[in-house]
């Protein structure tokens, strides 16, 4: 049996732990007023005491960092796949091979040196040379562009105040220059209006060929009426393509004759 002094200390310590916290004190008063709910109070007390106490801010920070890391590696994977694909396209491969020959890189790859290289090693080294040249010469835009640190979720959150202030300043300039002073749109502003009309993201619009953007500007698609005509033309052209597509014809014929699967209940 514990000595009286030890028991007294435990009682005092328990009383202090109970009364020092406002929430615990309320639970204790409630238990005194409702002794019939003793077991329920006992469960809530220990479930709260044993629950892990984790700072929500730490959880959010760790989650954001994890998402950012996943974004970074995922984007690099997409970028490398795009480079590997471009290395198989004759147009880019021939140009990269010519540049490599002019710089003597392919000759260096075939040099034996001290360690004799196998044909597979030479082929892999030449492939890496061609891919590196393509990386340095071609600016890939859109969803397969080279990953940028500033595009990660973590940095987007950190830079959000700056982006918000920049957008407000840009919007005020737009209102003042074009709505109040009535200035004529420049090429950048015209492309911005066209992109918004097409409901495309910046990366999607950047991935378009230059000649497509030139066509948009020649047809003055920043003007609403011109864009509506262009949109109608694109829809009609798409309908014609689908009408001549054998797969689309088979699908329409199937929908007409068979239709989508149906569930029926048949009485025996």
Image (spheres, rainbow, N blue to C red):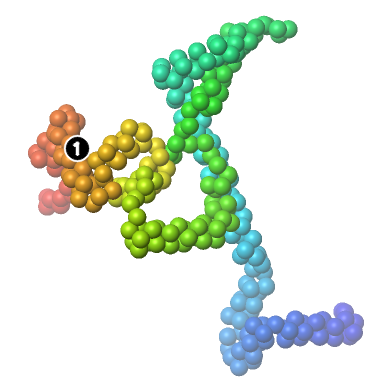
The residue under label 1 is 238
Placement of 212 over or under 56, stated as above or below:
above
Closest to the observer, 265 or 91: 91
Q: In the structure shown, which secondary structural element does the residue marked by tag 1 occupy?
A: helix
Q: Residue furthest bottom?
A: 33
Give me the residue at 65% from left, 64% from top: 54
Q: Is residue 1 left or right of residue 177?
A: right
**Looking at this view, is 193 or 240 the one in front?**
193
- Quarter of the image where one finds residue 244: top left
Between 241 and 247, which is closer to the camera in this rendering? 241
Task: Give x and y (percent) for residue 51.
Answer: 64, 68
Q: Is residue 200 above or below residue 175?
A: above
Task: Give left or right: position of 57 versus 229.
Answer: right
Tell me the crowding category of disc 1: few under 14, some 14 to 19, or many 20 or more residues within 10 angstroms, Cα based: few
> What is the tally of numbered marks visible in this picture?
1
| 182 up-or-down from 13: above or below | above
Name, please, the residue furthest toward the left.
Answer: 257
Q: Position of residue 39 (x, y in %)?
A: 60, 81
Q: Nearer the viewer, residue 192 or 187?
A: 187
Q: Quadrant of residue 114?
A: top right
Residue that appears at 65% across and 7% down:
111
Is 69 above or below relative to 140? below
**What is the quadrant of the N terminus in the image?**
bottom right
Corner quadrant of residue 28: bottom right
In x, y percent, where is residue 27? 63, 85
Give residue 253's position: percent from left, percent from top: 11, 35
Left or right, 50 with reference to 68: right
Q: Residue at x 12, y 50 (%)?
A: 266
Is 162 placed left or right of 260 in the picture?
right
Evaluate whether residue 118 shows in this view. no
Can you see residue 106? yes
Task: Identify the residue at horizontal 28%, vertical 48% (top origin).
Answer: 222
């Amino acid at each position: 049996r514990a000595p009286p002094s030890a028991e007294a200390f435990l009682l005092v310590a328990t009383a202090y732990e109970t009364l020092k916290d406002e929430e615990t004190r309320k639970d204790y008063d409630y238990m005194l007023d409702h002794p019939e709910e003793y077991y329920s109070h006992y469960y809530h007390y220990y479930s709260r005491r044993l629950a892990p106490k984790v700072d929500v801010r730490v959880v959010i920070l760790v989650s954001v960092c994890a998402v950012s890391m996943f974004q970074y590696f995922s984007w690099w994977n997409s970028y490398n796949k795009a480079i590997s694909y471009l290395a198989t396209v004759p147009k880019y491969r021939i140009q990269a091979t010519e540049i490599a020959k002019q710089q003597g890189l392919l000759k260096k790859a075939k040099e034996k040196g001290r360690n004799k290289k196998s044909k597979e090693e030479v082929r892999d080294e030449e492939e890496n040379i061609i891919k590196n040249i393509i990386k340095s010469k071609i600016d890939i835009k859109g969803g397969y562009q080279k990953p940028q640190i500033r595009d990660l979720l973590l940095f987007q959150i950190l830079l959000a105040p700056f982006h918000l202030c920049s957008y407000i300043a840009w919007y005020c300039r737009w209102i003042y220059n074009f709505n109040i002073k009535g200035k004529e749109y420049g090429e950048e502003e015209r492309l911005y209006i066209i992109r918004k009309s097409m409901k495309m993201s910046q990366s999607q619009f950047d991935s378009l060929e230059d000649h497509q953007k030139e066509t948009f500007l020649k047809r003055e698609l920043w003007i609403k009426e011109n864009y509506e005509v262009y949109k109608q033309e694109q829809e009609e052209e798409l309908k014609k393509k689908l009408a001549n597509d054998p797969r689309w014809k088979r699908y329409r014929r199937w929908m007409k004759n068979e239709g989508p699967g149906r569930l029926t209940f048949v009485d025996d």
